[in-house]
Image: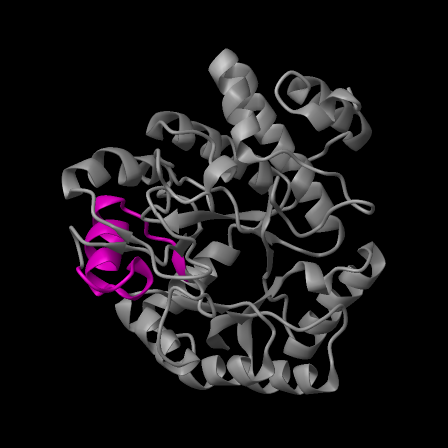
Amino acid sequence: MRAFITGVSGPALTDAEREFLRDAQPWGLIIFKRNVANPDALHALVDDARSVLGRAAPVLVDQEGGRVQRLGPPHWPKYPPAAAYGRLYDANRTEGLAAAWLGARLIAADLAAVGIDVDCMPLADVPVAGADAVIGDRAFGAEPEKVSALAAAFAGGLQDGGVLPVVKHLPGHGRATADSHQRLPVVTAAKTVLEAIDFAAFRPLAGLPLAMTAHVVFTALDQTAPATTSPVIVREVIRSSIGFQGLLMSDDLSMGALSGSLGERTLAALAAGCDMALHCNGSMDEMRAVAEAAPVLAGGAAHRAEAALARRKPAGEIDLAASRTEFAQRLSAVWEPARGLA
């Protein structure tokens, strides 16, 4: 297999995509709204991709809740943004942590039912005043200790439901004054400030199996390269200061923050120290360019990939109907949609 994760174009594989998956052998697949028709069709897509690949490849999705929820009504419940858990935490820490775990456990049940076993969540980004709204209420809060605690609870709920978490966006997207989907954000905060706030939120999460980088420049560390393509930031911050030793994937290489061809972006991310290149938009020409640049998974990256997948475990028992009622009751004070369900 090769060191990249790919998207596909629609709710079923095309013949060209089957040939591509069979020949290119990406490590995994990522699901977007364009791939989601209904539960049966989505499960069939997941099963088809794994059949073509010939293995139980990881299948990822961004199922955060709030603005970023690929599986949603009418077939799946609506979930709150991370900030709702933060509001509950402010009122009662124990209740906030319990709600974050339970929300993630319910999301895991939804994902596992259609064969998805990796959720690109939780965020440990710490937003600041004046930052772009791309993070906003996707964050658990604005204090690193609170963010870490809620992110850990959310990650635990996913893992207890048989789904691996991906912590993002290392080493922090909260100060970005631009949306990296559109252009490259540049953060000029001092290293001491970053260490005390942005990086601090990720340190307690360093033992999680998977993480995703930020397409953000931190001038105090690297004047020109965003974290995704900066050997300095990957080596000195993500691996050393934060201490993350799991599998590190790039954020989506097709985003507007990055420059160069898709092949050049892939090579730059992997050369910087990312283990895995992530490409999401399902464009076949771009997928081929990423695949051509991505090497066969080997060495430390292969070891970290194997170790991450080894942490997949069967879901624990849960009464889904009772848990959904409990969840609505817990969130009703801080999230408007829950009030009609409680």
Question: Does residue 289 belong to the magenta stretch?
Answer: no
Q: Nearer the viewer, residue 13 or 335?
A: 335
Which image quarter: residue 28?
Answer: bottom right
**Which residue is rendered at x = 69% and y = 82% of the image?**
18
* Quadrant of the image containing the C terminus: top right
Please report the bounds of the magenta region as a residue range.
223-249
**Which residue is rendered at x = 68% and y = 70% of the image?**
50
Q: Position of residue 324 (x, y in %)?
A: 75, 28
Q: Position of residue 83 (x, y in %)?
A: 52, 30
Query: Up-down: is 16 above or below 85?
Result: below
Say how many tags the image has: 0
Q: Is residue 318 left or right of residue 223?
A: right
Residue 92 visible to the viewer: no
Q: Is residue 218 left or right of residue 324?
A: left
Q: Position of residue 246 (x, y in %)?
A: 38, 54
Q: Is residue 144 left or right of residue 47?
A: left
Question: Does residue 226 belong to the magenta stretch?
Answer: yes
Q: Nearer the viewer, residue 226 or 294?
A: 226
**Which residue is rendered at x = 15% and y = 50% of the image?**
220
Q: Position of residue 144 (x, y in %)?
A: 34, 30
Query: Up-down: is 87 above or below 300?
Result: above
Residue 336 visible to the viewer: yes
Q: Please, which colouring scheme is shown?
A: one colour
Residue lying furthest top: 91
Query: Up-down: is 14 above or below 205?
Result: below
